[in-house]
Image: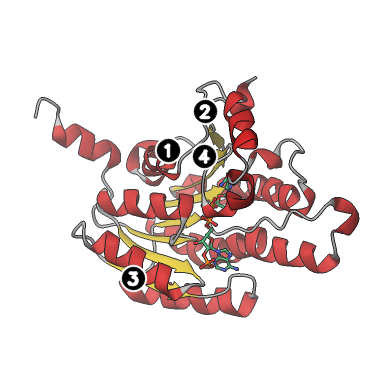
Amino acid sequence: MDHDTAYLTGLFALEGRVAVVTGGSSGIGRAIAEALARCGASVVLVARREDELAATAAALESHGRRAAWVSADLGSREAVHRAAEEAAAAFGEPDILVNAAGINLRPPMDDLTPRDWDTTMAVNLDAPFLLGQRFAPGMAGRGYGRLIHIASQQAFRASFTSGAYGVSKAGLVALARSQAEAWSGRGVTANTLVPGFVMTPLNRRLADDPDRVKELAARTLTGRNGLAEDFAGAAVFLAGPSSGYVTGQAVFVDGGFSAH
Ligand SMILES: NC(=O)c1ccc[n+]([C@@H]2O[C@H](COP(=O)([O-])OP(=O)(O)OC[C@H]3O[C@@H](n4cnc5c(N)ncnc54)[C@H](OP(=O)(O)O)[C@@H]3O)[C@@H](O)[C@H]2O)c1
């Protein structure tokens, strides 16, 4: 090795940290969960489907890390509260919270019902808020915490039927700022990662249209669409010691989609 391992460790290592990752069983959340685990964190995954959760936990454990999972529908406040307690029971109170669970219902605005609105807000915005309220004061008390939310281009501009989804993601960007204001002085940062178009199950419908996929790739500066793995490094940075002076920010991981 010709690099300074101790220096790298000081910047990025998550040894001894506990992370809760919602949506950690698929796509971007799964890639982030794996990255945090491989950098040393014990990880608790939260999502609904048990098979995906168990398979992801096994994958993290295969890297020699501790992993646990909680099955919960984050669209229900009661379930969010229960999931938070169960998650904290696995390895202790978390130091890192990643809110990656999200849904995008995409009905045209004319057809968007109050029910679509409520479901979207519950999963995409209310759950991150409630989990932040549950975990962040403890992080602040211990002097270290990292809140990471996954937002969207649609928090900043309307496209692809932004509907309720774009509003929920814009709320998440503002929530990170409010959390940053509240807790950064006590060691808890709050930021959002902003993807472009990422090839995950969430986008299966769009991803099945090769012309659309090509057209979206052409709108980036890198010439390709995102992969879940593209979020690993940014998440490790935002979860780790070296990002302590980065807070209240929206960090775009989008191949330059938003830059032109
Ligand atoms: N892919 C993109 O292009 C893109 C772009 C911008 C933003 N994002 C955001 O990135 C995040 C991750 O998306 P992804 O693309 O990785 O999608 P994904 O592969 O579909 O993963 C979504 C995850 O959220 C969980 N989830 C969904 N609804 C839930 C609920 N009601 N309760 C608990 N867990 C729930 C899913 O597990 P279960 O279904 O088992 O519950 C799954 O683990 C989302 O917040 C999404 O809005 C994605």
Amino acid type for the residue under numbered disc 3 = Ala
Q: Residue at x 35, y 36 (%)?
A: 242
Q: Position of residue 119 (x, y in %)?
A: 72, 67
Secondary structure of the residue carrying tag 1 is helix
Q: Is residue 155 left or right of residue 69?
A: right
* Up/down of 3 relative to 146, above or below: above
CA–CA distance in space, label 1 to label 2: 9 Å
Answer yes or no: do the residues labelled 1 and 2 have beta carbons within 8 Å? yes
Instruction: Judge from the rendering whether residue 10 lies leftward or rightward of residue 165; answer left or right.
Output: left
Q: Is residue 243 above or below residue 96?
A: above
What amino acid type is highlighted by mark number 4?
Answer: Thr
Question: Circle 1 sits on which residue?
Answer: 230
Type of residue at label 1? Asp
Q: Spot the residue most to the left.
A: 1
Asked which secondary structure carries label 2, the reply is: loop
Q: Mark 3 — residue?
A: 68
Q: Report the amino acid beneath label 2.
A: Gly
Measuring from the top left, give residue 135's x and y in whole percent.
48, 64
- Is 62 or 148 nearer to us in this picture? 62
Q: Quadrant of ligand 1?
A: bottom right
Earlier-in-chain disc, 1 versus 3: 3
Structural crowding at the residue carrying mark 3, measured as other residues with C-alpha within 10 Å and reported as few (<14), some (14–19) or many (≥20): many
